[in-house]
Image (cartoon, rainbow, N blue to C red):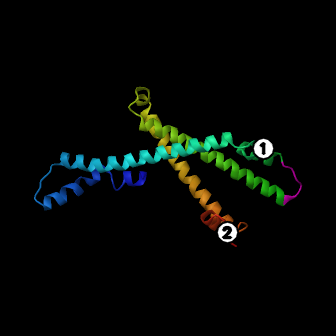
Amino acid sequence: MVFFGSTLFKTRDNIGTVQEPLQEKGILVNKNQAQAVAHEFSDKLWDLHKWIGFVICALLISRLVIEIVQPGEEKLRTKISKAAGFTTNNLLDRKEKNHYLQVKWGYLLFYFLILVMAVTGLGLAFEDVSILRRWNGTITQIHSIVQYFIYGFIIIHLTGVIRADGRKYKGLVSGMIHGKVIR
């Protein structure tokens, strides 16, 4: 979405795209008129971006509610505490424990990044609120920077899942897709 908004649907780059077909049909529009039309397409894309952001906010809130209402032994905090307290002399078990903890801390990092993205996105979506207008530049910068951390997280996560599927956890990806592990 952001990629398209900053490339294909960039208003300045589409002024000629609006003018040329109209000129071929004998309709002359000046640069300002063509810019207004090109900007409408950009606005539609950003509106879609905003609605997707609202959906992500709703999903994040539902995930937080699930974490709060689920039984204690299923809470992420409990799982991390149990794993951190697990001791063993077996090297293989220690590696498993460390991997498990890395994955769980990774989830927390992901949720934190999504939370920052959601809060800053809401700040941008409701930029007309006077208190938010003053912070618009800072909010925009934070929102833009965090997106790159999320991209990095996604790349690392997908790489890890594919490596795990190719090694110890065969069928992991197909299990995610089909709901069962296919061996």
Instruction: Give the amino acid at mark 2.
Output: Gly
Q: Position of residue 159 (x, y in %)?
A: 61, 62
Mark nearer the N terminus (2 vs 1) = 1
Specify start and end residues of the magenta stretch as a single range. 86-91
> Which residue is at 51% across, 41% downward?
118
* Residue matched to label 1: 81
User: Is 118 situated left or right of 19 in this image?
Assistant: right
Q: Secondary structure at mark 1?
A: helix
> Which residue is at 69% across, 69% downward?
170
Vertical relation: 173 (above or below) 71: below
Quarter of the figure with residue 135 = top left
Quarter of the figure with residue 166 = bottom right
* Residue matched to label 2: 171
> Which residue is at 76% across, 53% downward?
98
- Check residue 179 in the rendering and tell me which mark sits there, or answer none: none
Residue extending furthest left?
26
User: Is 90 situated left or right of 56 in this image?
Assistant: right
